[in-house]
Image (cartoon, helix red, strand yellow):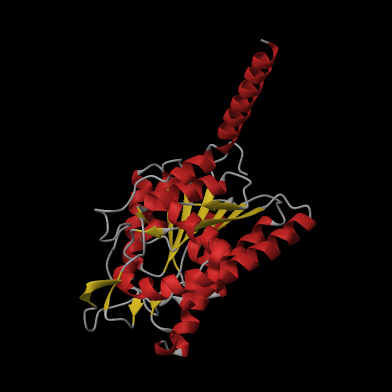
Amino acid sequence: MAGSRTETVVITGASAGVGRATAREFARRGCAIGLIARGEDGLAATAREVEALGGRALALPADVAELDQLRAAADRVERELGPIDIWVNNAFAGLFSRFLDATPDEYRRVTDVTYYGQVHGTRVALERMMPRDRGVIVLVGSALAYRGIPLQSAYCAAKHALQGFQDSVRCELLDAGSRINLTMVQLPGVNTPQFDWVRAHVAGRPRPVGAVYQPEVAARAIWFAAHSRRKEVIVGAPAWQAIVGDKIASGLLDRYLARTSVAAQQDPAPVTRGRADNLFQPVAGDAGAHGRFGDKARTRSASLWASEHRLWLLAGAVAAAAAGAAGAVLLETD
């Protein structure tokens, strides 16, 4: 990592939502941050927040689906902020639609941003990190990387693909004896503006399923993953439930989600006719980090806390077991 030098970080999808909250999390630690997104209004606002919190900001309008644009952005970061220590692949595109109601171009665009955007970011980061033999790359995944749900087949497929991509590339780095860490954060539903600008071929306004977390929870998980040697950090009880449930009873889960999940992902209020979405073009204006679900969004994750403190928890469990064993010996000798 960077030692005593200020860390240089790149965050994609930095103009809103989880990327916006992550930029603030790193800014509080005094990092120099390259902010990548398409929406220039949101980028400018994020840059102002980073500077106000004590970080350095470099706004870089770019589309992560375009490898050349990412390479040019990375070159500017290294010229103006220094060698990249951490690269956070956060940008994504969504589509709420039954499979046959989505056009091939829409499906491809979700894949280009959500999957290839992270693949391109990893390539660009590794091109710069490999000669230095240091750095961390964070893939931002989802519980849906393990368990697909209806109406989001393009997004789920992209997140599944990222998991296989990480396994393969991580093995290659280990084989090369590299000190670069490729880690992945699996997120639950998050209260971000995405549900108001995602493209939707459904009747009701898109909404997340199950428990929802504030984007600051996701940002803390990304910070933690970037400063550990973990392969994976799973955030929130719903993510664990989806992962474990799919391993135990995948077929039964198919039937349950078929009965419940289509309706659960839609508000009673209808999608506004002619509403703008950000699939192919950014939506104008600054949407911020938070969505419309703040009244029910959780601000903490017990599973993230346990992950962050697992050594202490392990030590406590060992101490408790030792105390129990010692007590049993004393009882036996009475």
Name above or below for residue 115 compared with residue 74: below
Q: Is residue 199 left or right of residue 269?
A: right
Q: Is residue 329 left or right of residue 281?
A: right
Name above or below for residue 296 compared with residue 66: above
Name above or below for residue 274 compared with residue 324: below
Count how many numbered circles sit on residues in the image. Answer: 0
Q: Is residue 307 left or right of residue 193?
A: right
- Identify which residue is drawn at 62% across, 18% down: 327
In this view, the residue in front, 248 or 269, is 248
Q: Which quadrant is the N terminus positioned in?
A: top right
Residue 140 in view, yes or no: no
Residue 318 appears at what percent x and percent y? 63, 29
Residue 173 appears at what percent x and percent y? 73, 58
Residue 129 in view, yes or no: yes
- Identify which residue is drawn at 33% across, 63% down: 42
Residue 262 appears at what percent x and percent y? 36, 75
In this view, the residue in front, 306 or 82, is 306
Q: Which quadrant is the C terminus positioned in?
A: top right
- Identify which residue is drawn at 50% across, 83% down: 108
Going by the picture, which residue comes out furthest to the top? 334
In this view, the residue in front, 280 or 10, is 280
Residue 285 appears at what percent x and percent y? 27, 67
- Identify which residue is drawn at 48% across, 45% down: 304
In this view, the residue in front, 34 or 266, is 266
